[in-house]
Image: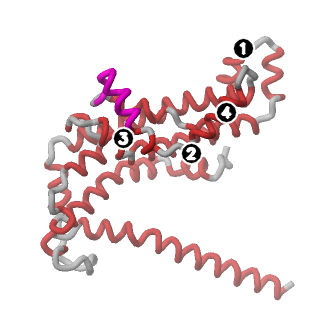
Amino acid sequence: MATYRRGRGLGDRLLLLAVVALAIVWIAPIVWVIGLSFKPNDVLMRSTGGIHLPPFTLKNYVDIIASSQVFAWMLNSFIVAIGQTVLTLVIASLAGYGFARTNFPGRNVLFVLVLAALAVPEQAIIVPLHTMFAAVDLHNTYAALIAPRLAFPFGVLLMTQYFRAIPAEIEEAALLDRASRLKVFWRIVLPLSIPAQATLGIYTFLHAWNEYFWPLVSATKPAMYTLTVGLASMQTNFAQTEGIGFLMAQAVFAGLPVLILYLFFQRHIVSAVAGGGNK
């Protein structure tokens, strides 16, 4: 028994050491980016080493904030990300419940098509999307930035599988009391799906906040840029060699709002990722 306990203790230490090593490997690039963002660009032109040594500067961040449109771009990103998150949760929940609990003609065929959509790359539909929104003159609007990402097959699949895991007996009593299917969904099933809703909402928000390709195509006016597109537009022709600190400051600035949100909702995020164990 003592040998077993010693072996188990050694295994736990080795596992902890491996986790710490992986955490350092994961954090190191972030620390490097933050360190470079506080270094003068003329110093970085000579060497990108010694990020912990002076001189340091805030000029890279001042240059970003000095642009009068940066905070407008951030507002655009918040509107797009929140709009996508809320509407995706509504659509994916209703579709998932329909697939999980109702029988309608062509249900299985339609569900297979939803699964097949997971294999379609974004680049394959970018031209049809651009043509469709251009035909109705919707480019450079919030609708154009939000609507294409509402067709989210992964969200429908996630909610379908979660609803199927909820025992049907919970709903049958309400249905016997002549409650409508929509009322059962709203009053009984939806509250039980909070962990899945949180997981899908977090994933959708982060994806929308970091989205670059479609906003780059759809938003051609600076006033409608999202933060990722707007910061990229501020780069000079020689930014890769002469403005490394400025580029790193852009990366930190773009990720800062998400970090702040994580700090505020850390408990809910961890609970969602862990499967909602703390319900």
Q: Main secondary structure of the magenta part?
A: helix
Give residue 16's position: percent from left, percent from top: 61, 76
Q: Secondary structure at mark 4?
A: helix
Disc 4 designates what residue?
111
Residue 263, percent across and down? 44, 52
Q: Which residue is mark 2?
A: 119
Amino acid bearing label 1: Ser
Mark 3: which amino acid?
A: Trp
- From the image, state whether disc 1 or disc 2 is nearer to you: 2
The mark nearer the N terminus, 1 or 2, is 2
Give the amino acid type for the residue marked by disc 4 in the picture: Phe
What residue is pinned by disc 3?
214
Mark 4 vs mark 1: which is more N-terminal?
A: 4
Q: Is residue 39 magenta?
A: no
Q: CA distance from mark 3 to mark 4?
A: 26 Å
Q: Tell me which residue sits at (29%, 54%) in the image.
A: 253
User: Is residue 123 or residue 80 the one in the foreground?
Assistant: 123
The residue segment tinted magenta is: 127-139
Q: For the point 47% across and 74% down, which residue is it?
A: 24
Q: CA distance from mark 3 to mark 1?
A: 40 Å
What residue lies at 30% left-to-right and 42% top-to-bottom?
A: 216
- Is residue 137 left or right of 175 when viewed as pictured? left
* Residue 222 at least partly seen: yes
| Dot label at residue 180 | 1
Q: Residues within 10 Å of mark 3 (few under 14, many from 20)?
A: some
**Observer-nearest residue: 269 or 136?**
136
Q: N-terminal of the two: label 3 or label 4?
A: 4
**Image quadrant in which the N terminus is located:** bottom right
- Farthest bottom residue in view: 3
Please name the amino acid that badge 2 sits on: Ala
